[in-house]
Structures are given as C-alpha cells and as structure tokens.
Amino acid sequence: MRLYNTRTRQVEEFAPADGQTVRMYTCGPTVYDVAHIGNMRSFLVSDLLVRTLKYLGWQVLNVMNITDVDDKTIARSRESGETLRAYTDRYLDLFLEDLATLRIEPAWRYPRATEHIPSMIQLIQKLLDRGHAYVSEGSVYFDISSFPRYGLLSGCLPSSAEAAAAYSRLDSDEYARDDIRDFALWKAAKPDEPSWDSPWGPGRPGWSIECSAMSMEYLGPTLDLHVGGVDLIFPHHENEIAQSEGATGQEFVRFWVHVEHLIVDGQKMSKSLGNFLTLRDLVERGYEPMAIRHQLMTAAYRKQLNFTLEGLRQSTLALFRLWDFADRLQEISRPGDASAILADDLESADSRFEMALRDDLNIPEAMAVVFDLVNQVNPALSRNQLSRTDANALLEFLNRADRVLGFIAHDKGSLDSEVEKLIAEREEARRSRNYARADEIRDELLRRGIVLEDTVQGTRWRRSFE
Ligand code: AMP
Ligand code: ZN
C-alpha cells in the first residue's frame, strides 16, 4: 500500500521489511486520567492501519506502550492517596474498556513503562558507552551534539531558544544539562517520588526512553511502522530516533505515520484547554459508540477533523441506515440466482474499497464505497427484487468491509422492553381494528426513534434515520 512517511515527507510504497510481518509500534496513553476522544482518534487510526494491513494479507505485531510513570501520574496518584501502581491500574482498565467500546482491536502487547525499567537502564548504559550521553547530578542526559541526525524527522534542529521554550514546558526543573536542548534519559530521584535503583543512583526514566526500549525489546532494532499524533513528532519521536539509533547504529523506524488532531472550534481537543469530551461522556448522553467510531473516521488521518455533535448526529443516521440495510438483507427469503448487475456492482465496490485503503489509508473513500453501494441497491431491495443469493453476496461484502471499518456488525434485537410492549399493543389494536390507537402508538414509537414498517411479511421495526 502507499503510505505517507513523515521522515521523507513523501507518499511511498509500504511493505514490511521481511515481506510478511509488519512490526508496528503505537505511542499509547499516559494513564493518569480517562482519555478524551481526541486521543481516541489517534488510537483508532492505529487500529484502522492494523486492520488494513491484515486485510491486505500481512501479519501485524502491534505494540502499544502504557505510560504509567511521569509527572502527571505521580502527581495525581499522590493527590488521590493511592500508590502509583494502584492509581494507574485503574486508568489502564478504563482505557482498555474504552478501546473495546470503540471496537479497537487489542494490540499484541501493552508493555507498561514501570515493568521495563531494566531494559531502559540497559539502553541508557549503551548510550553512555557509545558517547551519546553523560551523567550529571544523578541524572543522565542525551548529548544532542553527538548525534548529527537530530532534527531530521521534525524538519529542523530547534534553536536553543525554541528548544528552551519547548523543554521548559516539559520539565522546567532541569538545569543540570550542558545544552538546554539535551533531554533527560534518566531523572535523579526527588524526595517522595517513586524511584528505581540504577548505576547512577535512584531515579526514574525520562519520558521518551520507554518507547525506544520497549519497542526494540519486543520488535527488534528496526520497526516497519511507528504511529502517533502529530504533537509527538517533536520532541518525543525525535528523541526516540536519537536514543535508538544512537544505541544500535541501525535505522530505527522505516515509516513514521502521524495522525492529525481532532479539533473543536479551531483548537486542538486537549485536557489543558478544557475543550474535551470523553467516550464515556458521549455514551452516557445516549450516543451510539459505533456512531462515534464512524464520526472519528470521517476525515483522512492526515487532515484535522472538526468534532461537532451535529456531525455525530449525521453519523448516527448514516449508521442506522446502513444497519437497516443489512437487517433487510438478512430477512430476504426469496430463492433465485445471483443477478448479473448486482455481481458487477459488487465487484467494482470490492476493488474500489481496496484501492481506497491502499491509497494512504483513505478511510473516508472506503466508507463512501460502502454507502454508495447501499444507495445503488436500495431501490431493488425496496421493490423486493433481490434473491437470497444476492443478499448473501451483499452481506459477504459488508462483512469483508467490516474487517476494516468495524462499525457494520450490530445486534438488532436490543429494543427495550417498553418499546416491545408498545409494538405488541399496536399489533393487538390493529387486529381489533382500533386504527386510531394503532396510529397513536406508531407516533409514540417514532418519537422514541423507532419506525414501524408494514410489509408483506408483516410488521418490521427499524431505528429512525430520517
Ligand atoms: P497522551 O495520553 O497525552 O500521551 O496522548 C495519547 C495520544 O493521543 C498521542 O498519540 C497524542 O498525540 C494523541 N492526541 C492528543 N490529543 C489529540 C487530539 N486532539 N487529536 C488527536 N490525537 C490526539
Ligand atoms: Zn512514544
């Protein structure tokens, strides 16, 4: 497939180095709080990429790190009076739950930073041995001047002034560096903070070293793909390259994939701006998780996506329409051969779908292929012209597409019991020719988003999508 590589700033032909298995690493969450749907967009893109690579026939080993030690997790666990472990366990569980709610397939491994301190220490030692790092007051820093390639990913070697500004936001308390642009690999312990023993005294790892150490521990020195949000390009990913390549002398990542932000009113959705929504907020308000998945997929990953509740409403309607289409296909019993026209439509949908995926993960286009097919087939479906054979062929296509899209499979039988009672009562009213009452109930159901359709096979219900 063709994929945009941030490092070369070009769309390039991608294939795993060994021709079979994609070694992929996705920067995961810091488990200090519930993730917002902006974070979830990044993880969803990673999921879509994994699913696409599998769809195209490759095996994928996807590793996602869990950052369970940093300034935020330490501060929050302290406020809550819990140990760092107990505190981060809780948010890790909530995160995994959120992934499941959005039908994001589990990664192959979810290594936690605190469980990989020895391999980080080993990596730091290697950097010291190779002259890329130095010890100062119990901390270890990467010496940027020892690594001429620093800055190639983000496109510029930051001036000292820019770097000072960036780093002062990150860790304003570090003055022991030779150059303000040098970054911490190991931070000397502060009083009352969790710490681990190391050759340089007690301390904790710097933020970026975990990704270098854990990705290479599970996937080897060279990854095929590395995914994260665009805000991670500098300094996080720049640092990962310096640490990994400094230690191994080999190329660290073949393809860098960066996800643009989810924005709200022109600004990045973020905790610090306070303009964020969590998946839980939206589900509690009654939004269908698969509609949220759909909405987060409506822009290509390299474009910003503006989140609005109106957009989410549109996604809900589109989804219900698609689900009803699949339900009606399930209900067809008419025997007969496959119709030739439909077979042509399906073949072209299949190839357009795959082309869209191969074209730098053009998910909006792949979604359009599915919805176009629904529009093409709907008239014949309404006129009862499809056979069981046709229906099966269409359902097979939807299943195939769903291996990537992930929002088509659904469980129709989840009407609440009150609604079921109303439907039964309307049947009864119709049998006793009380049409006024039957219409009343139909209107009541409509207000609840349920549409009743009287067909030759009897009455069927669907969710309203008008
Ligand atoms: P964090 O838990 O802060 O380390 O972030 C986890 C992931 O979410 C990273 O890949 C970030 O780049 C990404 N991210 C943060 N904010 C947004 C946003 N508004 N839209 C898309 N991705 C985001
Ligand atoms: Zn990372």
Image (cartoon, grey):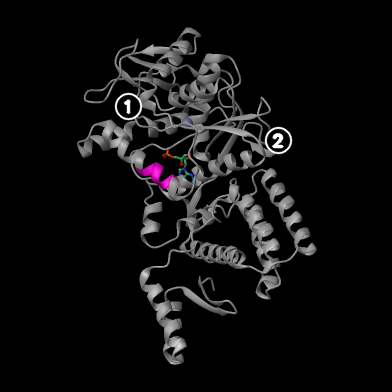
User: Is 202 above or below relative to 14?
Assistant: above
Image coordinates of residue 4 in percent, x first then y, are: 65, 38
How far, Cα to Cα, is label 1 from label 2?
41 Å
Image coordinates of residue 100 in percent, x first then y, are: 44, 46
User: Which residue reaches farthest front?
Assistant: 335
Residue 32 or 162: which is nearer the viewer? Answer: 32
Amino acid identity at mark 2: Glu
Left or right placement of residue 357 versus residue 448 in this view = right
Residue beneath the point at 49% across and 65% down:
313
User: In the drawing, what numbered circle is on residue 173?
Assistant: 1
Q: Which residues are magenta?
A: 94-99
Left or right placement of residue 148 versus residue 8 in this view = left
User: In the drawing, what numbered circle is on residue 364?
Assistant: none
Image coordinates of residue 422 in percent, x first then y, are: 39, 78
Residue beneath the point at 60% across and 79% down:
456
The residue wearing badge 2 is 12
User: Which residue reaches farthest left?
Assistant: 81
Q: Secondary structure at mark 1?
A: loop
The count of marks equals 2
Q: Secondary structure at mark 2?
A: strand
